[in-house]
Image (cartoon, grey):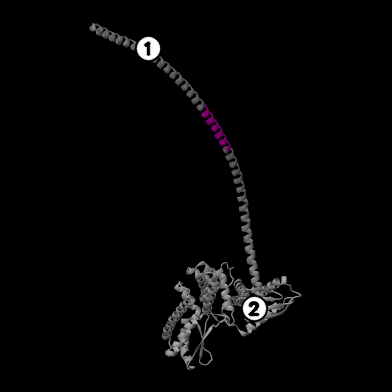
């Protein structure tokens, strides 16, 4: 029984397979037919699209060709028009050139005719000139050569006279100009040197054991004197003053070298150029050592350390420099000490104040060698050796060349004024001193309302008694300011002058 079932199953499966195959075949043939129809349709659509594109491209190409042809024809027409215009212009130019050529030919003919007439006229003039020369020779009795020589001679005499007159005029003009220029130069030199040197000692005196030594110092034909002057840069004044030789020069260091050299030569007794050179060299070394020692002592006394060695040497040079009779190195040490004391009282940097005070006049060490004021020279030196901005500003402001804008600068300015103004610090010529005091009192008395004036403190202060009925408390400040301005404009003085007005109250101002 189960066999029949198996057979039936096998037959069923086989029938199913056959039936499935037939169904799939029919479906595939149907799909193939549908795909062929679709492909055929797509092909027909593509052919139609391509044909449409081809027609469009043909139309565009025809339009482009037509446009290009129109542009080309337009350009050809424009070029033909331009060529036509150029041909017309060329034809016009040719006509103009032809006319000009005709005009030039006519001018040439006229010119040739005039040249011919000129030649004929020239020939006639030459004949007339020859006749006139012959007539002149006959009248004057001179030949042409003789007349020429006579004229040249007369002309030379006239020129010589005029040249002499011109030379006299130029000489007078040059002399006047030279005198004026010389006066300008001298006045400029005086103005530059007077402030620092007029009241200072510019000479050194060397005593001699006897007057015979003068002749030995002068030497044969003055060779010894010339050697000393050329090696030291000073001038030796050997006059009738017994047993004394004067050394003159603005540079105190050179004067000191010359003084030491002379003293050594006098003590040695052998005076000749070679010996002089050796003594000057030895004296120079001694002075340099003295300068260095003086600078080191100044820094030690003031407690200022860390200075550049060149600054120390420049400080030492101030040992031989004086200002109105006051030794500048001692003045600098004094200013440094005063500045330190004031800085301590005010709570400022004492070390910085001492340093600025010690260096404030450092420029005076080189005033004989470098052009300019000692303030500017000092500023340049401080910058060169890398001093701080506070120190540089204090140097620049200590004479009021610039307005002080730091406490240290004000302290140094005050210390400098105190050191210079104290009684006995500086000396002046007695006559100049008295005149300055009288002038100071006269300036104050010239104002209305002033009753009495008293110049005190060696001219560093003037006390003015005013009339209470004419000068009240409100106007005292104005009167003091006017007096200060007049003192500043009419009077020359070192340092500053204190103007002290006294009534019921006092108003104080300073002429700087």
Q: Residue at x 63, y 56 (%)?
A: 117
- 67 falls in the magenta region: yes
The answer to which image quadrant residue 372 occupies is: bottom right
Q: Earlier in the sequence, mark 2 or mark 1?
A: 1
Q: Position of residue 502 (x, y in %)?
A: 70, 76
Magenta extent: 66-85
Q: Quadrant of the C terminus?
A: bottom right
Residue 461 numbered mark, or none? 2
The residue most toward the front is 1
Q: Say few, some or many: other residues with alpha carbon within 10 Å of mark 2 (under 14 / 14 to 19 / 20 or more).
A: some
Q: Position of residue 3 (x, y in %)?
A: 23, 7
Residue 223 in view, yes or no: no
- Residue 76 shown left or right of residue 38 in the figure: right
* Frontmost residue, 116 versus 48: 48
Residue 30 numbered mark, or none? 1
| Up/down of 485 relative to 95, above or below | below
Considering the whole magenta stretch, tell me its main secondary structure: helix
Q: Position of residue 122 (x, y in %)?
A: 62, 60
Residue 17 in view, yes or no: yes
């Amino acid at each position: 029984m189960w066999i029949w079932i198996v057979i039936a199953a096998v037959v069923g499966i086989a029938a199913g397979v056959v039936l499935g195959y037939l169904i799939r075949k029919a479906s595939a043939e149907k799909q193939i037919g549908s795909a062929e129809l679709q492909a055929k349709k797509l092909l027909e659509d593509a052919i139609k699209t391509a044909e449409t594109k081809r027609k469009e491209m043909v139309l565009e190409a025809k339009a482009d060709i037509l446009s290009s042809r129109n542009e080309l024809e337009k350009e050809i027409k424009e070029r033909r028009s331009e060529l036509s215009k150029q041909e017309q212009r060329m034809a016009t130019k040719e006509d103009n050139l032809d006319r000009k050529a005709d005009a030039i030919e006519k001018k040439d003919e006229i010119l040739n005719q005039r040249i011919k007439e000129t030649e004929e006229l020239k020939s006639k003039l030459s004949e007339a000139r020859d006749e006139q020369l012959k007539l002149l020779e006959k009248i004057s009795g001179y030949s042409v050569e003789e007349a020429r020589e006579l004229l040249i001679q007369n002309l030379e005499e006239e020129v010589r006279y005029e040249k002499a007159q011109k030379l006299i005029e130029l000489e007078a003009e040059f002399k006047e100009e030279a005198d004026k220029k010389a006066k300008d130069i001298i006045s400029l030199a005086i103005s530059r040197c007077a402030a620092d040197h007029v009241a200072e000692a510019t000479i050194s005196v060397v005593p001699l054991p006897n007057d015979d030594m003068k002749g030995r110092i002068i030497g044969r034909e003055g060779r010894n004197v010339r050697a000393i002057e050329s090696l030291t840069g000073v001038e030796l004044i050997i006059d009738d003053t017994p047993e004394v030789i004067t050394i003159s020069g603005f540079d105190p260091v050179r004067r000191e070298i010359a003084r030491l050299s002379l003293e050594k030569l006098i003590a040695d007794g052998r005076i000749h150029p070679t010996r002089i050179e050796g003594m000057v060299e030895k004296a120079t070394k001694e002075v340099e050592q003295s300068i260095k020692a003086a600078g080191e002592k100044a820094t030690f006394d003031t407690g200022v350390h860390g200075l550049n060695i060149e600054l120390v040497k420049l400080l030492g040079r101030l040992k031989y420099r004086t200002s109105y009779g006051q030794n500048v190195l001692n003045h600098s040490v004094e200013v440094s000490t005063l500045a330190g004391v004031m800085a301590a009282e005010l709570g400022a940097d004492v070390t910085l104040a001492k340093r600025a005070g010690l260096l404030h006049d450092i420029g005076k060490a080189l005033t004989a060698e470098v052009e300019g004021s000692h303030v500017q020279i000092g500023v340049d030196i401080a910058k060169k050796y890398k001093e701080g901005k506070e120190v540089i500003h204090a140097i620049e402001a200590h004479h009021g060349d610039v307005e002080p804008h730091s406490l240290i600068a004000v302290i140094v300015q005050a210390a400098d004024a105190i050191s210079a103004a104290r009684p006995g610090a500086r000396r002046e010529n007695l006559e100049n001193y008295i005149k300055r005091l009288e002038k100071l009192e006269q300036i104050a008395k010239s104002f209305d309302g002033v009753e009495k004036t008293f110049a005190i403190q060696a001219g560093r202060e003037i006390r003015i008694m005013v009339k209470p009925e004419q000068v009240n408390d409100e106007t005292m400040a104005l009167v003091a300011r006017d007096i200060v301005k007049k003192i500043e404009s009419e009077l020359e003085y070192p340092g500053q002058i204190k103007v002290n007005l006294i009534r019921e109250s006092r108003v104080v101002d300073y002429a700087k």
